[in-house]
Image (cartoon, rainbow, N blue to C red):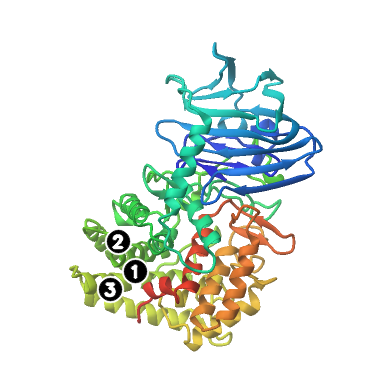
Amino acid sequence: MIGDCESCALVNRHGSIDWLCWPRFDSAACFAALLGTEDNGRWLLAPLSEPRRLERHYRQDTLVLETEYETAEGAVTVIDFMPVRDQTSNLVRVVMGRRGKVPLTTELSLRFDYGKVVPWVAKADDGMLRAIAGPNKVMLRSSVALHGEGLQTVGQFYVEAGQVETFVLSFTASHLPDVAARDPLALLDETEEFWRSWCRRCKYDGDWPEAVKRSLITLKAMTYAPTGGLVAAGTTSLPEFIGGERNWDYRYCWLRDATLTLLALVDAGYFEEADAWRQWLLRAVAGSPDQVQIMYGIAGERRLTEWELDWLPGYSGSRPVRVGNDASSQLQLDVFGEVMDALYQARHAGVAASEPGWALELSLLNHLATIWQQPDRGIWEVRGGLRHFTHSKVMAWVAFDRAIRSAEEFGLDGPVERWRAIREEIHRDVCARGFDDQLQAFVQSYGSKLLDASLLLLPLVGFLPADDPRVVGTVAAIERSLVSNGLVLRYQTAAADDGLPPGEGAFLACSFWLVDCLVLQGRRSEARALFERLLTIRNDVGLLAEEYDPRAKRQLGNFPQALSHLSLVTTALNLARGAKPMEQRPAAP
């Protein structure tokens, strides 16, 4: 991934940019080959002959990607990056000759509206190429000669040792003037300094600085700078099972990520970003409490209508390709707990300078008091029937618990005794109806015999101590039944009525939750071993998707996935600091 904190692009190992949405993360893609074919838009820049060696890495503490190629003719490096934008967005590609004289090729296929619309391309007097379709305009400035061929812009050229060739692709609205030319190498210097300056603020001092910094950079890049909203992923419809239909649009902001986002940012030293996220959260949920959604657009948009792109065949034939997300209209009780926990953590960390959100929190709690006994869709956003999910009830408990703590610790006014009564009632209800005596474990939903990895969160949010026999039994049961090749599944999709065909990989955040539980249980050597196993799953540049298939040894689901990287950072902090983030969250019932 490369990005400018407002959008991102994905570059494959062979030098092709196969995904780019402009001008925002959730805009229609102009490169959609990731979900289709080359005809759906991409930008290839690579040696003409097959490389003998290919290696990729980010420049240290940056989001500047380098791909090093060695061929029979010599060696070149391709540098890809998106400068953090001021007024316009640019994608820059630089080729540097290292040895010999290497022939290269470039093929640019712009296809607006998710690979469907072919733009009109014309050459300006200064040689710049201008591509326009409807509201979109993209300009290409290149130091090498290019020409049109079969609805593509193509070129072949040589690069010798010490030679540098540059390409700058710029976006603006079609009714606006062309973007002014910028020096690509000056942009490279500015981009490197931006990321390195940002990284110097990192306070992590544990055993895995490279992995933690890479995850934090990834999270920063997935934050929409104008609003502070953090997208769940940079993509839509990358499958959780190859050839399956568990393909969702994740280019939105989930309230469920709120607490982990705050803890990861604050504990790593990024208070400004944590406050921006808190402000986004308050703006997004403002309004009638019965209209709170589980996710919003990056500027707080509520209408995320789901529809299918029938002209795209999907990643490896995994259809349908979806835009929008109907889960935005689901009732998921756990988000109330996440919002209250996040805002409590903000106060605890000193992020919140005033309390304009307390009245909103009171309103949310009043509403939750009337609905917590209802069934919902749960943390996994099932599209089957409504159920009384155990995790959902636990997070309702968290909402009232954090309200009590906010009132007591920060002198805020509220009906604390009423909240205590509701908190106790929820706790009794969960322990009575969510625990199975035969399994000696908490179960996915009341009356069910199914286990669920979300139950690993019970000790992490403070619902019960990690050494409580019911928690010990639950963790053991999950280790027996939901661990596949050393990694944790969300639940058994073949047995659960989630409204979809079975089949998916191991959900990576769940494995990080298991590490956290092992830490709390004093099983530190096992925790460390599992964490280090998870680090090996990252791709060659340190990025994680949503899931992993341990048999095929490949990542699955949308990419990169914020929750996976948030969990990595939080777990690394837990291991390094004696469970500090987990100590922030729990409260005795």
Q: Answer yes or no: is residue 505 visible.
A: no
Position of 252 with respect to 43 (left or right) is left
Residue bearing mark 3: 405
Q: Examine the rendered structure and indicate whether residue 526 appears above or below residue 335.
A: below
User: Looking at the figure, which quarter contains the C terminus?
Assistant: bottom left
Q: Position of residue 107 (x, y in %)?
A: 68, 28
Q: Position of residue 397 (x, y in %)?
A: 37, 73
Q: Residues within 10 Å of mark 2 (few under 14, many from 20)?
A: many
Position of 191 with respect to 105 (left or right) is left
Sequence-earlier tag: 3 or 2: 2
Q: CA distance from mark 3 to mark 2?
A: 16 Å
Q: Which residue occupies the foreground of this view, 62 or 538?
A: 62
Q: Residue 452 — which label?
A: none
Tag 1 near tag 2, CB within 8 Å: yes
Q: Residue 364 — which label?
A: 2
Position of 557 with respect to 48 (left or right) is left
Q: Which residue occupies the foreground of this view, 536 or 404?
A: 536
Task: Tell me which residue sits at (55%, 85%) in the image.
Answer: 473
Q: Position of residue 533 (x, y in %)?
A: 64, 68
Q: Identify the element where label 1 is drawn.
A: helix
Q: CA distance from mark 1 to mark 3?
A: 10 Å
Residue bearing mark 1: 399
Q: CA distance from mark 1 to mark 2?
A: 9 Å
Residue type at numbered disc 1: Ala
Tag 1 near tag 3, CB within 8 Å: no
